[in-house]
Image (cartoon, rainbow, N blue to C red):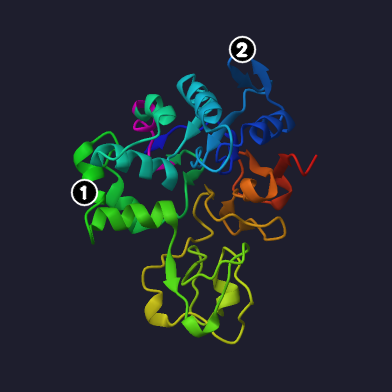
Amino acid sequence: MNEKSQGKIDVVGDVHGHYQELAKLLEKLGYSKEGNTVKHPDNRRLGFVGDFINRGPDSVKVLSLVKSLHQDGLAVAVLGNHEFRLIQDSVSGKEVPTEYEPFLPWLRTLPLFLELEDVRIVHAAWHFSSIEQLKKKKVSDDAFVAETMKKKSPLGNAVKRILSGIKIKVPPDLRLVDRFGIQRSKGRLKWWMDLRGKSFAESFLSPMEPKVHEHGPRDEQLPMLEPYDKSEKPVFFGHYCLPPDIPKVSGQTVCVDGCVTCDKTLWAYRYDDTQILDASNLVQAGIKSD
């Protein structure tokens, strides 16, 4: 989906129902509350990378605010994997939490990815061929949503790549665990890089322990990767639940997901109409950071 950019935009990471942290972050970014919305004195606008719901205590308050901002033209937003699963459940006739039902019509107006004049926004990965497959698809179309739920559906795989990232199987003898101590059979790749010859420690975006430097992905595991060249416009995404010490800016890519449920801190990137990305433009705020 293409849309004109106003140049100055603050892109916010996965909120996951943490309204208090969102309010603190918006205040730190210079937004002030006006009635049921927030505005910036310099007419900046907000971008949201999706995953507004679940995990935190105030998903409805987050949805209400983001919906209001979006409908008033003060924010742009894309769907996260949590919202898309909600929509899939609704289309397939599964029970949807009552509190989310009023927001479904609005959620189904949101795009799976967003191409602005200056930047791109997607939930997990800007995968060029998947984006191309999905360009003319709308989440408001029941037939499209139903197709994504079919086994081995090309459209379903395209949605998974951009909303859940690109994963590879981890050799079981390595016994790698994520930051929560959960053993993982798959690792989430740094999708924007050419990972041939790289170690597992260099290849995984969501950190895994122990760090493995002597082994890495096999070349045959990597054909779906489509490196994101430095000549491309900046792309912002969330999804990966990064600890504070993990770099969030790499080349023309910025991950703004700092795992608010775990760290009680929400991240954003203050973008000012420049191709040059810098970690100094990252802003964080929340219960622990203040």
45 left or right of 4?
Answer: right
Mark 1 and mark 2: span between their CA atoms? 41 Å
Q: Residue at x 64, y 77 (%)?
A: 210
- Which disc number belongs to residue 211? none
Q: Provide the residue designation for mark 1.
A: 147
Q: Is residue 256 above or below residue 105?
A: below
- The stretch in magenta equals 105-114
Image spot of residue 107 (x, y percent): 39, 32
For the point 50% across and 29% down, the residue is 63
**Residue that extends furthest to the left in the rendered view of this protein:** 143
Q: Quadrant of residue 270?
A: top right
Q: Amino acid at mark 2?
A: Gly
| Three-letter code for the amino acid on which mark 1 is drawn | Glu
Residue 9 highlighted magenta (yes or no) = no
Residue ID for mark 2: 35
At horizontal 58% and vertical 43% (from top left) the residue drawn is: 13
